[in-house]
Amino acid sequence: MAALPDNLSTKSPLAELHSGDKMTREEFHRAYEEMPEDFQAELIGGIVYVASPLKLPHGTFHLTLGSAFHSYRVHTPGVIAADNVSVFLSDEDEVQPDLVLFLGEKLGGQSTATSDNYVQGPPELVAEIANTSRAIDLHRKKVSYETAGVKEYIVLCVHPLQLFWFDLTARERITPGSDGILRSKVFPGLWLDEEALVKDESIQLADVLNQGLQSEEHKAFVEHLRAKTAKKD
């Protein structure tokens, strides 16, 4: 077979993605895999949304909240934390959340790893850092997460600075206690100081999280997970 001229592309016509395109998840994923590594897009309700360039506040809050998720994972066996991983939610939804926290499949988690290491199914908890994506994250994407079965959803809005934590199962917001601490319902011991998080006060945030990790509810959760792991083995 003769070689193709240098000026001809071998890419499929599907290898283009633009905001507003309508397609199935399979079509989207096939095209997305052919895009450059630094390109980011999501399929939400069958509509393509191409990500805008990320600014410093997004990266700062992403790192701060991600550190809390990582610390929780380290102290809670069987819990998986990840950032910017593609998640297959439905035939019309392939999202790439800023952060996810979920239980391993052996512990009854809702998500599984595909053969090529994407996430299939809804994570228990999803978090987004929202700036230009605020309207999408708080509305269209929230609907997709709720429909798919995500249990809790955090949206940290950069401008104006505001934190939303939703219990999607009960369809209500999780609000801080009188001590200003937000407590996860699905991940006992995941405690976040709302003011410390929005003000990026990492030491206070870590102190409160450590209190949660030392709480009786977290100890009971860890024992529960260990018992389930032992039973599986």
Image (cartoon, rainbow, N blue to C red):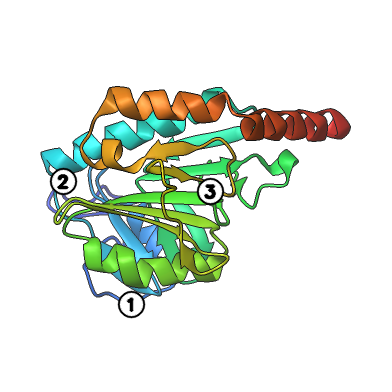
Residue on which the image places disc 3: 119
Which comes sooner in the sequence, label 3 or label 2? 2
Residue 225: mark: none
For the C terminus, the quadrant is top right
Q: Residue at x 32, y 51 (%)?
A: 34
Determine whether the residue tagged by mark 3 lies in a helix, strand or loop.
strand
Q: Residue at x 28, y 67 (%)?
A: 136
Query: Residue 144 occupies which quadrant of the picture?
Result: bottom left
Asked whether residue 111 appears in the rendered view, the answer is yes
User: Mark 3 or 2, which is nearer the eye?
Assistant: 2
Q: Residues within 10 Å of mark 3 (few under 14, many from 20)?
A: many
- Locate residue 8, reporting x and y percent: 17, 55
Residue 10 sits above or below residue 45 on the image: above
Position of residue 145 in the picture relative to residue 67 (left or right): right
Q: Residues within 10 Å of mark 2 (few under 14, many from 20)?
A: few
Marks 3 & 1, CB-CB < 8 Å contact: no
Q: Residues within 10 Å of mark 1 (few under 14, many from 20)?
A: some
Residue on which the image places disc 1: 22
Marks 1 & 2, CB-CB < 8 Å contact: no
Residue closer to the observer: 20 or 184: 184
Calculate the distance from the C-alpha at mark 3 to the C-alpha at mark 1.
22 Å
User: Mark 3 or 1, which is nearer the eye?
Assistant: 3
Residue closer to the observer: 21 or 33: 21
Residue 54: mark: 2
Calculate the distance from the C-alpha at mark 3 to the C-alpha at mark 2.
23 Å
Dot 2 amino acid type = Leu
Query: Residue 78 occupies which quadrant of the picture?
Result: top right
Dot 1 amino acid type = Lys
User: Mark 1 or 2, which is nearer the eye?
Assistant: 2
Residue 16 sits above or below residue 117 on the image: below
